[in-house]
Each structure stands twice: as C-alpha cells, then as structure tokens.
Image (cartoon, rainbow, N blue to C red):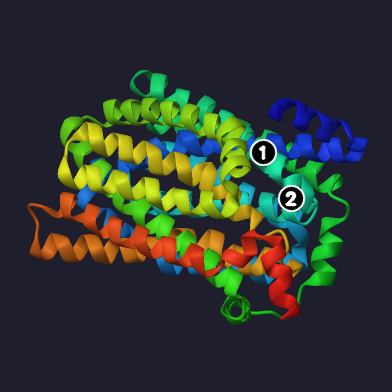
Amino acid sequence: MIIDRIRTEIASFSSKEKLFLFAAMLCSFFISADYAIIRPVSNSLFIQSYGAKAFPYAWLLSIPFNLAVVALYNKYLTKLGCFKIFVVIAGVVTLGNCMAATQISSYKALPFLFYAWKDVYVMLMFQLLWSVIHSTVELGRARYLYGLLFGIGAIGGLCGSLVPGFLAVKMGSESLLFSTLPLYLLLGMSYHLLIKNSGSVDKKVDEGMNKSSSLRDSFKLIANSKLLLAILCMVTFMQVTATITDFQFNSYLEKLYPEKDLRTQYFGRLLSFGNLLTMSFQFIGIYVFIRFLGKFKTHLMVPAVLCLNGLAFALYPVFGVISYAFLTIKCFDFSLFNVIKEMLYIPLKTEEKFRAKALIDVFMYRGAKVFASFFVLFLQLFFANSVVSLLSWVNVAIFALWCFVVASIREHYYPELQAAKSLA
C-alpha cells in the first residue's frame, strides 16, 4: 500500500521534479556514506589519544568553533548562494580528511580537532541539502518523500559502515579517511544536479532573506517563534540524551576493545546493524507510525521509548543493554525523529528555513553537547565510580521534559486546531 502510494506520487511528478528527487536521494546517500566511515575512525583515534573520559572536554571546547562556522555560513549564504558555499565547504572537507589520513597520528592535537570538525561538517552538508528540499518540496508530498529521502540516506550509511566494519583491521583506521575524496566528488555532481532542478532556489534565498542579517538576528527569529523554540528544545533534548548514551557506550567499548583497529571494526559493524534498523524505520516504520498514531503521538512516542531504555540501563548496567540503548537512540535520531522534526519546518518562512534552521540543526545539534558535558563532568567529580549508570537518570528526567515541550505545541500537529486558534 505504501509503496503503491509512493509510486503514484512520483509518477505525477514532472521530469524536472523527478531529477530533483533523484539528486536529493544521491546527496543523502553520499553524505551518510561518508559519515558512516569517518565517525568510527574519529572516535577510535580520539579514544586512543585521550581516552573516553576526555569526550566531555572535546564537546565543550568545540562549541566556539561550531558557533564560528555557523556565523560564517549565515554571513556568506546570500553572497555566495547554495552551490558556491557547498563547493567551499566540500573542498575544505575533502582536503582536511585526506591530510588527516597521513598526519593525524603525528600530531597530538589532530585527533581532537578532527573529532570536532567531522561533527560540524556533516551537519552543514545536511543543512545545505534539507534547506533546498524544504524550499522546493510541497507540504502535501513531505509525508512520503521525506521518509524516502532519509531511507536512501540510511542505505548510504549502511554501505559506508561496511568499510570500517570489514577493512579497518586490514587497512588501518587512518587509511579509511581517503574515502572522502571519491564520495565527495560524486556528492558535488549530485548537488549540482539538485540545484539545477530546484526551481531557482538561490533566487528564493536572495529574495526571502535579509542580506544584512547577523547571528543575533538568527537568535531573534527563534526567540520570536513558539514553533522554532519548541524545535530547538526537542533537538537539544535529543542530542543531550544521545551524547550521554554515546558516552556510556564508549566507556564500555574502551574497556572491552582496547586495541584501536578492533574497536573501529566493532563500531563499524554495530553501525551496519544500526543502519539496517534505521532503514526499516525510514521505509516502513515512519509511514506506519504517522498513519496510525499521527504526528503528535509519534512525537510523544520517541521520548517515551527512549525513557524506557534509560530505565533499563539504570537497573541493569551491562554492555548488552547499553549497546541496545545506543542503537535505539541513534536509529530514532537518524530516522523517526529527524523526519517528523523536518516536517515542522515546512510552513516556516525562507529566512527561518535557512538561518534559524542552521542555528538549530548545525550549532545546537552539537552545542547540546555542552549540557551533556556538564552532567558528565559533574558526576565524574562527585560520583566517579557510578557516573555511567547515574547518567541514565539524567536521561529519564530529560525525556519527561521533552514530552512536555511536544504537548505545548500540540496545535501545530492538527491543522483544524491551528485554524481554530487563528480565528480566535
């Protein structure tokens, strides 16, 4: 039934719309594939150089860098346009990753810098992709197309994660960083096709955005919108809890897999399985949940399920349980949560879709790690021997707040409630 609806929807597209959709799927695939390779390598090299306990310091020190990158992005977006700014960022990523492949083991600071950079650039890439999609795709089609686009990204993530999963020990973790070169060349061609068939998205950006807007103005856009504030809170909650779960998982991983390449291999194989779960959600689960629960109840379901996982690990702190919790939160983050979160951006203005969204989806996605860092460092200071299990109770409290935020914007999930409110 779902497949038939998607086929019917795509069959109604013009040739230009089909090319746009094809290009968007390719971009999602290549960005996800690259990240699935780079992430296990950067984590493994970071743990080798500093240990898992140093992750909170990396999250804290990377925040000024993240904010500077977002400020530059917002400043030059209208001056350069989407494609030119994409070329600049993609060029820096490709050059940086290839240099890291040969130099990262030679300099003590490079594993830290690379770990921080990889989290920023992948969000910038997705920001440049999804802002164009939001400005091109009609609201009525998002229900089907967004799940499809995220699903193709999951396939890319699965293919990419097989590289460290099966080649890390044979080739060495550092050598895998060269994979960015061919992947980003293909990504560049795909993004060019996307812009070419987007219906003059750069013109929409130029007409719909204030060219003199500053980073402060982007903050004001969020502060003046109840919906943007709610999205900001939900993104923050997801990333804080995901970061805490990541720390818990890496703490166990460091103890059980002390050798660098074996650790990269295990992480890559675990991500392969995680991407299979993500694909099942994106191609099937999203449509089922939205159809039978609706967007509002689906949004509530995400923190509810994750809360149960947090309780499970708090009561049974073993590697199997935290591995399950880690897979679940990553699966939800990259599939169900991302799709229903992206849908909330569709009715917003152009400037909100680009500048405010960049602040939320690039800076706050990584800036949320600051809050996670404070929780981890505080508990390490006073409860060093039980910090990993205690963090689960922090997650449970955040999930409760998350449910309250979703309830506060209930009218945005039901058109009739929103219409009634506008007439009141």
Q: Is residue 38 left or right of residue 93?
A: left
Q: Is residue 20 visible?
A: yes
The mark that comes first in sequence, 2 or 1, is: 2
Cβ atoms under marks 2 and 1 closer than 8 Å: yes
Mark number displayed over residue 133? 2
Instruction: Compare residues 195 and 418 and report the one nearer the observer.
Output: 418
Q: Is residue 400 left or right of residue 422?
A: left
Q: Residue at x 85, y 46 (%)?
A: 196
Q: Residues within 10 Å of mark 1 (few under 14, many from 20)?
A: many
Give the residue type at disc 2. Ile
Q: Residue at x 47, y 30 (%)?
A: 277
- Residue 59, quarter of the rendered image: bottom left
In the rendered image, the vertical position of residue 301 relative to residue 352, given as above or below? above
- The location of residue 345, given as percent across then percent down, is 66, 60
Give the residue type at disc 1. Leu
Q: Is residue 24 left or right of residue 40?
A: right
Q: Is residue 103 visible?
A: no
Instruction: Compare residues 247 and 346 and report the one nearer the observer.
Output: 346
Q: Residue at x 22, y 43 (%)?
A: 313
In the rendered image, the vertical position of residue 266 relative to residue 302, given as above or below? above
Q: Residue at x 41, y 56 (%)?
A: 239
Q: Secondary structure at mark 2?
A: helix
- The location of residue 186, given as percent across then percent down, is 69, 33
Between the C-alphas of marks 2 and 1, the distance is 10 Å
Residue under label 1: 149
Q: Is residue 360 left or right of residue 147?
A: left
Q: Residues within 10 Å of mark 2 (few under 14, many from 20)?
A: many
- Tag count: 2
Q: Secondary structure at mark 1?
A: helix
- The location of residue 420, given as percent across then percent down, is 72, 72
